[in-house]
Amino acid sequence: MSSSESGLDAGVCSFCDQGLRLMMRCGDCGELIGLCDECDAMWFVPDSATLPFFPSQPDIPCPFCGVGGGWEHWKRADWDDVRGTRWEAAVRQRGDRNDVSTEPGVEGESDAAGL
Ligand SMILES: [Zn+2]
Ligand SMILES: [Zn+2]
């Protein structure tokens, strides 16, 4: 049960230049957005050169399906959500070391068998 950061992000927010664009998934339609954890800017698309929009608080309606209800209906996206979407490349650039790799568990085996 490793509780390493489970959240994926698509790079630094180009609006405030401080926050990370966290990958969030609409709990209703499943569409993905990038959400700055500092300034709450939202992106429909990975391209940070585009201008973000700012959801109306406190409803945070989904820009795709229009369902609101606050932050509760937004879930942190994981790789299963992101894979195969327009966000995949942007997230992968950031988190390539999070990629599932089969590292051989090499732990120092100092205890050699005695005679
Ligand atoms: Zn921001
Ligand atoms: Zn939605």
Image (spheres, helix red, strand yellow):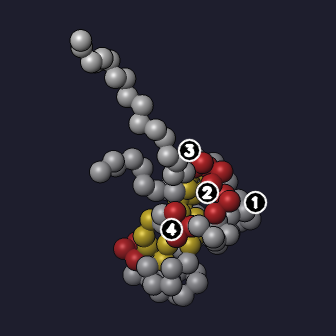
In the drawing, what numbered circle is on residue 114? none
The residue positioned 67% from the left and 69% from the top of the image is 86
Mark 4 vs mark 2: which is more N-terminal?
A: 4
- Decide: is 108 above or below 87: above
Q: Nearer the viewer, residue 87 or 70?
A: 87
Tag 3: amino acid: Arg
- Total marks placed: 4
Q: Which residue is mark 3?
A: 97
Give the amino acid type for the residue marked by disc 4 in the picture.
Answer: Asp
Q: Nearer the viewer, residue 62 or 79?
A: 79
Task: Tell me the kind of residue under disc 1.
Answer: Ala
Image vertical order of residue 54 relative to residue 59, above or below: above
Question: Which residue carries the number 1 mark?
Answer: 49
**Which secondary structure lies at badge 3?**
helix
Sequence-wise, which precedes: disc 1 or disc 2? 1
How many neighbours does mark 1 have within 10 angstroms: few (below 14), some (14-19), or many (20 or more)?
Answer: few
Disc 4 secondary structure class: helix
Q: Circle 2 sits in a helix, a strand or a loop, which is it?
A: helix
Of callouts 3 and 1, which one flags the residue occurring earlier in the amino acid sequence?
A: 1
Rendered location of residue 14, percent (x, y): 67, 54
Q: CA distance from mark 1 to mark 2?
A: 16 Å
Q: Which residue is mark 4?
A: 80
Looking at the image, residue 112 lies above or below residue 27 = above
Give the residue pinned by disc 2.
91
Q: Are marks 3 and 4 in contact (CB under 8 Å)?
A: no
Q: Position of residue 30 (x, y in %)?
A: 51, 79
Q: Residue at x 72, y 62 (%)?
A: 47
